[in-house]
Amino acid sequence: MKFSLFAIMNQQFGVCNLSLVPVRTEPSDRSEMSSQLLFGDHFTILETTDKWLHILIAHDDYEGWIDRKQFEEIEHAAFVALHDLHTILGLSLSHTITKTASNEKLNLIAGSNIPNALDRFFYLRDTKYKLEGDTIKPAKDKFRNGVADAAMFYLNAPYLWGGKSVFGIDCSGLTQMVFRQFGLKLKRDAYQQAEQGELVGFLQECKAGDLAFFDNDEGRIVHVGIMLDNEQIIHASGRVRIDSIDNQGIFSKESGRYTHKLRIIKRI
């Protein structure tokens, strides 16, 4: 991540200081939510209006619009520090932090970024917080053995377009948030994630954590799920669910039919 001195001096940066903030495709409350920011997610500000910010999210290079009341501006040094941060909240339903000055509480979700805490106290810019609980340091070497349990944390979470939490999540949000627990960065949308990793040639060669991608009749990748083994997949369709998969695609026992057509399998 390199910035020229001129670019830094003329650029603005921000961080999400709320538990979960909608990212919209257009600067309007009526525009669809395409993603979400978690507490501690940082971004570059591309454009501002009276009410909205056009942002580029550092974690996945995703663009969108957020309400100007739902962020805190930070300096470039703080942006870099957050970019290099490797401390997040683990797989619990909620995590509570408290603003020490006002005693206000925020309930955060799994995967939220927490600046390095000392005795469970940390700062986000000038605001001091106390964390009720522990953070984790994602470890890539734990991915293959831990990915199934991490994915199961979201089992039966309702489908929500653009969602990234156990309270509502979409297919690529599920894969992104599960991989985030192990320090593995995925892009935001399924077709973008399909461009990452290495191709797995045969379904029988799949390992837990491989990503299966599915296309529509026009050949566009529109869905993704996490392989649990070479016969089962966990994915978000209506809800986060486990279904059977074969070379043709995902077979739903509930509907008695194939619901998604398999395109490729990738290993990150």
Image (spheres, helix red, strand yellow):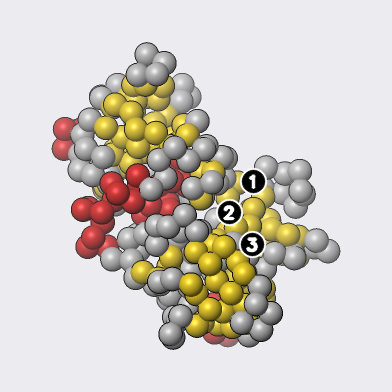
Q: Residue at x 64, y 53 (%)?
A: 22
Q: Which residue is mark 3?
A: 55
Determine whether 46 is above or below 262 in the image.
below
The one nearer the camera, 49 or 253, is 253
Which three-letter amino acid code belongs to the residue tagged 2?
Gln
Dot in front, 1 or 3: 1
Instruction: Work out how far the residue at label 3 is from the one at label 2, CA to CA, in angstroms.
Output: 12 Å
Q: Which residue is mark 1?
A: 33
Examine the image and state in which quarter residue 45 appears. Answer: bottom right
Q: Secondary structure at mark 1?
A: strand
Q: Residue at x 72, y 44 (%)?
A: 31
Instruction: Work out how far the residue at label 2 is from the one at label 1, CA to CA, in angstroms.
Output: 8 Å
The percent position of residue 217, horizontal first and vertical second, equals 46, 21
Determine if residue 61 is in view: no
Q: Which residue is mark 2?
A: 36
N-term mark: 3 or 2: 2
Disc 2 packing (10 Å; few <14; some 14–19; many ≥20):
many
Q: Is residue 207 left or right of residue 226?
A: left
The one nearer the camera, 221 or 164, is 164
Q: Secondary structure at mark 2?
A: strand
Examine the image and state in which quarter residue 85 appears. Answer: bottom left
Which three-letter amino acid code belongs to the residue tagged 1?
Met
Count of numbered tags:
3
N-term mark: 1 or 3: 1
Dot in front, 3 or 2: 2
Q: Residue at x 50, y 30 (%)?
A: 238
